[in-house]
Amino acid sequence: MTFYITTAIDYPNSKPHMGHAYEKIVADAFARWNRLKGEDVFFSTGTDEHGQKIYEAATKRDVLPQKFVDGLLPFFKGLFSELDISYDRFIRTTDADHEALVKELIRKASDSGDVYKGVYKGFYSIKEEAFLTEKELPPRDSVQWKAEIEEREEETYFFKLSKYQDQIIDYVKNTSFVFPKTRRNEILERLKEPLRDLSISRLKKNMPWGIDFPLDSDHVVYVWFDALPNYLSSPRELLSSYWPASMHVIGKDIIWFHAVIWPAILLSTNYPLPKNLLVHGFINDAQGQKMSKSRGNGIDPMQVITAYGSEALRYYLLRSVPSGEDGNFSEEDLIARYNGELANELGNLVNRAQKLVHTHFGGALSTQPQDLPLIEFSKLDALMSQFLYHRVLEELISQLHIVNAYVNEKAPWKNEDTREKVLYNVLEQIRVLTHYFAPFIPEACEKIGKQLGFSLVNFDELSFGLVSYQLNEGEIIFPKLELLSSFLLDLRVGKITDVSPVKGADKLYVEQVDLGNEKRQIVSGIAPYYTPEELIGKKIIVVCNLKPIKLRGVESSGMLLAYTLDDQTRVVEPLGEVGDSIGVKDLRSSSLVISIDQFLAEELKVKEGVLTAKSGTLLLNENPILIDAPDGSKIR
Ligand code: MSP
């Protein structure tokens, strides 16, 4: 049987984040599980490269959109390769055959009488790349409104979404299309409102970065009508045998597009509907806060991999975050899971068994009668079919407990009569469990196989007693992890681009700061010491990972470093370029969000004329940061 699985395609408007990593890991576990079931799997992922978001990010940096996305692509591919994401195809929406398919679908929809020209009036969110309904709009007086919402009236082509309302309701209601149930109910609730037709083109003169609209050369295709068909494009002949998709793995924020708009496009163009949507939750920071660029609390998955390895990250995310729910990311939890379950339960079991077989049988064991039941495949597979992969891991860990207890009880180191049978049973348990762990932690499972001298086979060839063993030399498979010492502060060079007073607070200024790849607003108590003009254009050092706060109702996302000399407060002025990071030698930089107390614990001060933290001397491009103030002057 064929099994076609996809992930959402990511916007390459900055480097990939933990959410991107998470989704690919989840999808990969399903792809691998189904391969080991002997299915004919096709696994597709990629990048969503058109649209306003990308266009703006590129324009801001003064590069062409294509160049901009080309530059970010290696970060996505690099991350997926580190994570062992076993995709068969990486699609970019700028691929020629994808563009051809999108055009073909629009022509087909038009042939079905589903595309017409009109005028769209409404409020457009630059961030969501969509016109929003009244309900979805933020309050009129909010900062968000100011930054993200524009009133627009534009000539556009519409797609008759409304025509398919009943068919979609029927599909969502009467099949297991949407997982989890709570999400399905949300969609059904929203579908009680009449659907509005969907604007599917943008005037080129307003936003040129898209696929040419095939019915009108003044228009480009709206980004979602461009992105969704990725699941159907290149290589065409190949996909025709895999479609309909078995599973689209997506995040909860894009469920409407996948549960409503995508089926409507398919109905209009005469394709069968995908079988399942696995809607995963969001990975938040350790405090449960949504990770975002403006908060600066994103955790770089590459950093985690460098520190603890890719399998630790895979295991942690799949085991700790229940399918369909949100989860918090904490390094401490990751380490606890890995050490407690992989190192202590699985790693130790393999190690113990290996040693005993080497000592007593020279590493060789032939078939023995079964003494301990194997974990049941059908139970695990049923859980996978219900998308409850975290429950599969739970079952595997329980079985490990059982096997470890069996070893303790049978004590093969002293009970000679049963030794051979017991050890053979233990090896068989390990072999079978290794197969079931393999979709989740593939690299470690390969290693276990190599050491115990078996290669992985399909699940249906896993019966007890089929192999004899000749073990190789053992080495530790899951070395214990320790929390790596890191420098807690994320300090970066910024440039003040604008300063304004805060109403009712004489001492405060609101500064707009350019950090190179992002802009921040921070509030500081330096109004008595500088005029706005003196500050504008100054380079400063910003503490970027402080939890944002509101001062006098004004949001402050960070803090600038300053010191006091002769009752005057001065900002620290570094020499580097905007965006440069400041760190401590040999310590990795943390990307965790910190409290003000954690900041103060670093005790920044001047020592021998340079800026120093408790963890060590601060370095900017390998040079210390000079400050003309007496030793011991406090910096904050
Ligand atoms: N380009 C669109 C998807 C088009 S699919 C035809 C998009 N891109 S995205 O880069 O913003 O998000 C890609 C995927 O990552 C989405 O499924 C999204 O839900 C997921 N995540 C983004 N942030 C996330 C977390 N913090 N946690 C988990 N997943 C999150 O949307």
Image (cartoon, helix red, strand yellow):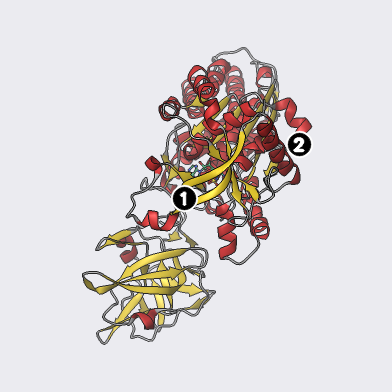
Q: Earlier in the sequence, mark 2 or mark 1?
A: 1
Q: Which residue is pictured at 31% across the width and 66% down the height?
A: 600
**Label of residue 235 in the image:** 2
In this rendering, position of residue 73 left or right of residue 372: right
467 vs 544, nearest the viewer: 544
Of labels 2 and 1, the one closer to you = 1
- Pointers 2 and 1 in contact (CB under 8 A)? no
Q: Is mark 1 within 8 Å of ligand 1?
A: no
Residue 557 vs 271, above or below: the answer is: below
Check disc 1 and report the residue beneath it: 125
- For this rendering, which residue is in front, 308 or 109? 109
Q: Residues within 10 Å of mark 1 (few under 14, many from 20)?
A: many
Residue 565 in view in this figure = yes
Tell me where residue 208 appears, x and y as whole percent: 63, 55
Closer to the camera in the image, 379 or 175: 175
Horizontal side of residue 121 vs 286, given as left or right: right
Under mark 1, the amino acid is: Ser
Instruction: From the top left corner, tell me how far across and down residue 529 is, in percent.
Output: 29, 82
